Structures are given as C-alpha cells and as structure tokens.
Amino acid sequence: MVKEFKLYRIDIKYIRNLQNIDRRVYSVSPQIGKEYRPFLGVVVICKNQKYCIPLTSFKDKHKKIKDKIDFSKINIGGTDIAAINFSRMIPVEDKQLKEIDLKIRRHDSDNLIERKNLLKAELKWCNEHSEDIENKANVLYKKYISGEYFKRKKDCLNFIQLEEICKKYNNKG
C-alpha cells in the first residue's frame, strides 16, 4: 500500500556527512541559499531503509529532458513546475527529518505564502502519483543495488555507501 507523502527538510550536519562520500548529494546549506530545499518522503526501499527524494525547481535544462527511470517532471495544468530527481535520493532515519509546515499564517510574508502554495501544489501532485513515484524509486534502487547495468546508473548516488554512513551517523550518541 502506498503511503501519503510529506515534505521534509533534512538535517544539515547529516547532509554534510553524506557529501563527504558523494559531493552530488544535494546541498541544504544556507550559505548558498538552499536551506529551503524540500525532500519528498519517506519512501521505504529494500532492506527497510527509508529514503527521501529531493525536489528541484523547474529549470530551462529540464525542458529537453523526458521522464525516465531517475527523473520525473511535476506538471500541473500543462505547466512543468518542478522535478523529482530519483538518482539523488538519500537514506534517512526519522531523526534527520523535519516536516515542512505548509500552514499559512497571518504573519507570513507574501513570498513565504507563495512558496508554501507552490509546495502544496507539488505535494498534491506527488500524492496523486504516489504509486508511480514509489515504484520508480524501488526499481531504480533495485537495479542499482543488483549491479545491473542501466543507462542512468552513473548519475545515481552510491546508495550502498550512503546507507553505511546513515547507519554510522545514527548509531552516534
């Protein structure tokens, strides 16, 4: 059964630990303006390891890219508004996750309200396509772990090494 997805922020210290193994792990650093990067999760993969998949804003370079094993466009009303990059999904445990609060409050700035509304739309689309997202994540993961060759394998993070870092990180104090 497919679960309802939520959006999360990931602990910056944990991300930095993962980046020590693979520099392609998406940053959440405030120094480069990425502290608001949302991750879609939690997708439970093989060996009961939880993974979060990063969302990315839609860029011109995405116009030419078709949906494939490691990439999906989020399209609402005929407009591509974001993308899901499965090749950059990361292993997580609950203590690395902070759910993004999408409630609009009176004191929220117009910019924040706009961001929350966009995230709500992205999350709604993801939940409407949750079975496809979960299946795609699992297929990609299983192909990667099995050692099977597939065209986009070189674009994937090293899931095996990152799971080892996740275990070590979470066994600390």
Image: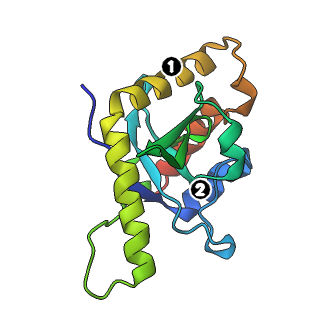
On the question of residue 92 being in view, the answer is: no
Q: Which residue is mark 2?
A: 15
Q: Nearer the viewer, residue 26 or 93?
A: 26
| x and y percentages locating residue 109 in the rendered image | 39, 85
Vertical arrangement, residue 71 with respect to residue 24, above or below: above
* Circle 2 SS class: helix
Which residue is depicted at the point 59% across and 16% down? 143
Q: Nearer the viewer, residue 170 or 127?
A: 127
- Tell which circle, 2 or 1, labels the residue nearer the N-terminal end: 2
How was this image coloured? rainbow
Q: Nearer the viewer, residue 110 or 76?
A: 76
Q: Residues within 10 Å of mark 2 (few under 14, many from 20)?
A: many
Question: Where is residue 42, by image quadrant?
Answer: top left
* Circle 1 SS class: helix
Amino acid on which the number 1 mark rests in the picture: Val
On the question of residue 49 being in view, the answer is: yes
Please identify the quadrant where the N terminus is shown. top left
Question: Where is residue 97, by image quadrant?
Answer: bottom left
| x and y percentages locating residue 6 in the rendered image | 33, 50
| x and y percentages locating residue 71 in the rendered image | 58, 34
Q: Which residue is mark 1?
A: 139
Q: Nearer the viewer, mark 2 or mark 1?
A: 1
Vertical arrangement, residue 94 with respect to residue 132, above or below: below
